[in-house]
Image (spheres, grey):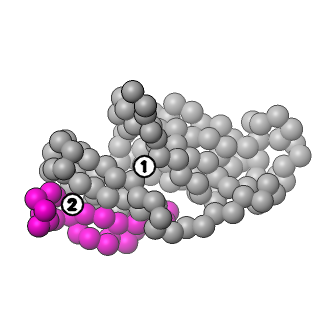
Amino acid sequence: MIKMHPYLNFYGQAEEAFNFYKSTFGGEFIALMRMGDMPDADKLPQDEQHLIMHIALPINENLVLMASDCIPSAKHVLTKGNSMYISVSPDSREEAERLFNGLSAGGDIEMPLEDQFWGDYFGSFKDKYGICWMINFGAYQ
């Protein structure tokens, strides 16, 4: 079976964001590598060496949330927007509420977590790091 994992890009906030996500989802990082760990890292500007090259947080046995920081010296450009959402389908309404409340803290709620006309318990928001999330209990259970 093919597995697909969301991969997020940040501008200097990957570690902070993933510690925040870890506080909601739980678990431990299975990878945390910094730009300074790469070969020839001494050629990077000093202020980029602490940035995250790759970080991975398993959410469950089928999903790993991953990310890295963009580095200006490599001409990486971050454009924040709503072209991607991470859709999470929890096992219960209670889990939906826990995830929604935890991940939306400090962010902007687009649709409150409520029973929807199509029959699901759904809400969406942009977290405090600019990442768009959908919490949807019902459709894929």
Q: Residue furthest right?
A: 43
Q: CA distance from mark 1 to mark 2?
A: 19 Å
Q: Is residue 127 magenta?
A: yes
Q: What residue is shown at x 36% (from left), y 29% (from top)?
A: 61
The residue carrying mark 1 is: 21
Which residue is more in the foreground, 124 or 14? Answer: 124
Q: Can residue 39 be seen at all in this image of the molecule?
A: yes
Amino acid type, residue under disc 1 in the picture: Tyr
The mark lying in front, picked from 1 and 2, is 2
Residue 93 coordinates in the image, percent (x, y): 15, 50
The residue carrying mark 2 is: 122
Q: Specify the quadrant of the image occupied by residue 80.
A: bottom right
Magenta region: 105-130
Residue 123, label in figure? none
Q: What residue is shown at x 72% (from left), y 58% (from top)?
A: 76
Q: Contact (CB < 8 A) between labels 1 and 2?
A: no
